Structure formats: structure tokens, C-alpha cells
Amino acid sequence: MKLLQDKVALVTGGSRGIGAAIVKRFAEQGAHVAFTYRSSAAQAEAIVAELEALGVKAKAYASDAGNFAEAEALINSVVADFGKLDILVNNAGITQDTLMLRMTEEQWDKVITTNLKSVFNLSKFALRPMMKAGGGSIINMGSIVGITGNAGQANYAASKAGIIGFSKSLAKEMGSRAIRCNTVAPGFIETDMTEALDEKTRDAYLANIPLKRFGKANEVADLCVFLGSDLSTYVSGQTISVCGALHT
């Protein structure tokens, strides 16, 4: 039997990068998958077709996770379309990197809203259907930057550190209802962003990673499969890094 057989999962920001890897891994493990996207409808529908070919139900939703009303409508739609919600992966996120002296209020607010407020929005509205189902797993995408900080990323680091505190608090609050909440904290993962780095910059980053390579999106997705599955029913309130020992 597959690890997520017949579970229903919602992944925000699921049309590219780490989000797309999570969506595909979940489907491979038997989950019915809903995911959100912001702009590329064609890309999202291509992923839906790929998932359906695996024999699961899939649907893409155009939705802004940082918008409170849209988050409520999204959860209601997913429950109406799929019948329940077992797993929520709050993956939607952006960067607006710059030094603090140059950071605008708009850059601060946009990152905090997209990265952190979205986690509040979706988690809040996911709790009732999870309680009705007798439990669930909320997986929040953090970053090692939320643990260590990073120059030029005060907004991003603050959003990811906030996610860690949020997840620990929600795990304690909802534990009696069998709802678990954990944070996944990736390090340097092979994405469009890392592919755009010049060789000198890549080498500088790699020199600090004990495993001497960037991670793969599937390696983050595999941890999410574990946290969404019944293999992790006593794991809650934790922050688990996927970073090649960059942060220990």
C-alpha cells in the first residue's frame, strides 16, 4: 500500500519548484492532490494531467494564499471537490532581497504577507475540516534562513522564523485533536534561482555545505511525504532541516 493512499492533500504554490515536486511525490504515493498557482494556468493544467495519469484525482486552483478571503474560499472549494482534507502544505513563498537600508515598506509587507500571513490564512480554515475528519497534518515550508538569518534577507528570514514559531504553537494547540504541525527548513535546493547563480557564487555556497552539493526538490518532497503519512503520527511541533548539514 502506498504511504498516502487515498489521503487528500492541498499544496500552495504547487505549480513549480519544490511545490511541484511535492505535488508529484504525493500523487505517486496515492494521494489525491489539490494545488494552487498564481499565473501559469497552462503549466498548472499540465501538472493536473500528469497526476491524473497516476490514477489519482487532481485539481489546480488559481488563488492568492496571502488573501484571507481567497484562502477561506479555497479551503471550502477543496473540501467540496474532494470530500475532505487530510494534509495541508503551506509552500507558497517569495523573496524580495535587499539590504535593510534599502528595503521598502512594500518589500517588507509583500514578503510577510505571501510567506507568513498565508500560513495563518490556510491553516486557520483547514482546522475545521481536519477536526471533523479526526486529525490531519499541516506542513509549513520554512528555510534555514529562518534559523540562521542572512544579510539582505531580513524580510524573508523574519517570515520563515515566524513560520517556525507559528508551527510550534499550533502543534501544541491542536495536538489534542490529532492535528500535527511541522516545519520543513530547506537549505540550498536546485531550483530556477540556484540555476541562475554564476559559477563563482555557486562554488562559494558549495564550499560551506558538508555534503558538497545542492539538494534536490524531490529530497524536500520525500520529507513532506513522511510528515503527511502515518509513519509520523508522533512527530509534531518540529523543525526539520533539509540542508546537507549546512546547519546543524
Image (tube, rainbow, N blue to C red):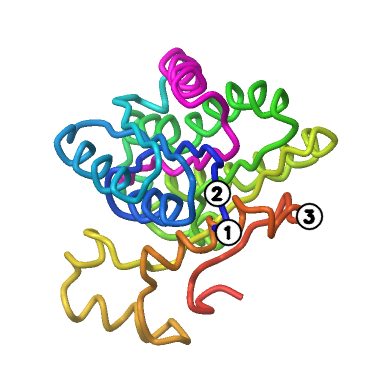
**Residue bearing mark 3:** 234
How far, Cα to Cα, is label 3 from label 1?
21 Å
Mark 2, secondary structure of its residue: loop
Q: Which of these two is toward me, 112 or 11?
A: 11
Dots 1 and 2: beta carbons under 8 Å?
yes
Q: Position of residue 78 (x, y in %)?
A: 46, 24
Q: Range of the magenta residues?
A: 69-96
* Residue 102, position as x, y percentages in the image: 29, 43
Q: In the picture, residue 150 is in which quadrant?
A: bottom left
In terms of depth relative to the viewer, which is nearer, 61 or 3? 3
Total labels: the figure holds 3
* Residue drawn at (36%, 53%) of the image: 24
Closer to the chain start, of discs 2 and 3, is: 2
Using the image, determine if residue 234 lies above or below residue 47: below
Three-letter code, disc 2: Gln
Front residue (pair 42, 80):
80
- In whole angstroms, how far apart are the C-alphas of marks 2 and 3? 19 Å
Circle 1: element type: loop
* Neighbour tally class for label 2: few under 14, some 14-19, many 20 plus, Cα within 10 Å: some
**Mark sitting earlier along the chain (3/1):** 1
Q: Is residue 195 left or right of residue 76?
A: left
Above or below, 240 against 136 in this view is below
Q: In the rendered image of this protein, does residue 176 appear above or below residue 151?
A: above
- Is residue 86 inside the magenta stretch? yes
Q: Amino acid at mark 1?
A: Met
Q: Amino acid at mark 3?
A: Tyr
Q: Is residue 65 left or right of residue 203?
A: right
Q: Residue at x 36, y 55 (%)?
A: 18
Q: Which residue is mark 1?
A: 1
- Asked if the magenta segment contains residue 17, the reply would be no
Q: Which mark is residue 5?
A: 2
